[in-house]
């Protein structure tokens, strides 16, 4: 009887310690810095102004947003290296910041801006 209890306790301790090691390894892998890739210009998109024009739509015109264009500048790599807090300090609104970062990641993954760019939601109509 004592042998069974000892074996069960040892098995339980071994299982919990292996979970701890796995969890620690997963945390270490997640904490490791990843280097984001700066893609090459595709097709007609060769500079930041063209990129902003390609992701802009009627109610979301990022190309004419002076705070966004001044924050990004003229360098191609600035599109992919600028962070959200830097855009916030430049005065870019939250919705424009989130949309720009989302569109940037889609472009980095190889998607065409003509396909993934969406317009802002129109204002709701209040009837009555």
Image: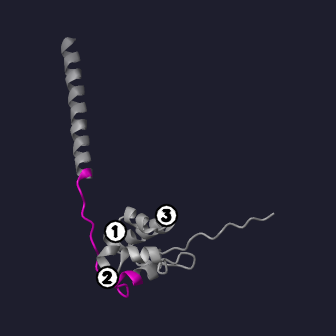
* Left-right relation of 62 to 72: right
Task: Please tell me whether mark 1 or mark 2 is closer to you in this view.
Answer: 1
In the orientation shown, which residue stands out farthest toward the right?
128
Mark 1 vs mark 3: which is more N-terminal?
A: 1
Give the crowd class for mark 3: few <14, some 14-19, many >=20 residues within 10 Å.
few
Q: Is residue 115 left or right of residue 40?
A: right
- Asked if 40 appears above or below 6 in the picture, the reply is below
Q: Which residue is mark 3?
A: 94
Against 82, is 2 above or below? above
Which one is nearer the viewer's eye here, 36 or 110?
36
Category of crowding for the residue at label 1, using alpha-carbon neighbours closer than 10 angstroms: few (below 14), some (14–19), many (at least 20): few
Asked where in the image residue 52 lies, by quadrant, the reply is bottom left
How far is mark 1 from mark 3, CA to CA?
A: 15 Å
> x%, y% of residue 110?
35, 75
Instruction: Answer yes or no: is residue 111 visible.
Output: no
- x, y percent for residue 74: 34, 81
Residue farthest top in this picture: 1
Query: Mark 2 — residue?
Result: 41
For residue 82, the mark is 1
Dominant secondary-structure state across the stretch colored magenta: loop
First in sequence: mark 1 vs mark 2: 2
Question: Disc 3 and disc 2: Cα gap in Å?
Answer: 26 Å
Quadrant for residue 77, please give it: bottom left
Q: Which residues are magenta?
A: 31-50
Image height check: is 2 above or below 104? above
């Amino acid at each position: 009887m004592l042998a069974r209890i000892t074996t069960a306790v040892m098995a339980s301790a071994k299982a919990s310690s292996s979970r701890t090691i796995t969890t620690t390894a997963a945390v270490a892998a997640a904490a490791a810095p990843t280097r984001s890739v700066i893609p090459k210009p595709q097709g007609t998109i060769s500079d930041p102004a063209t990129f902003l024009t390609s992701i802009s739509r009627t109610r979301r015109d990022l190309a004419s947003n002076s705070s966004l264009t001044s924050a990004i500048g003229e360098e191609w790599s600035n599109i992919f290296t600028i962070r959200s807090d830097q855009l916030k300090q430049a005065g870019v609104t939250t919705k424009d910041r989130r949309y720009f970062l989302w569109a940037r990641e889609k472009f980095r993954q190889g998607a065409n801006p003509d396909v993934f760019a969406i317009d802002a939601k129109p204002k709701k109509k209040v009837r009555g």
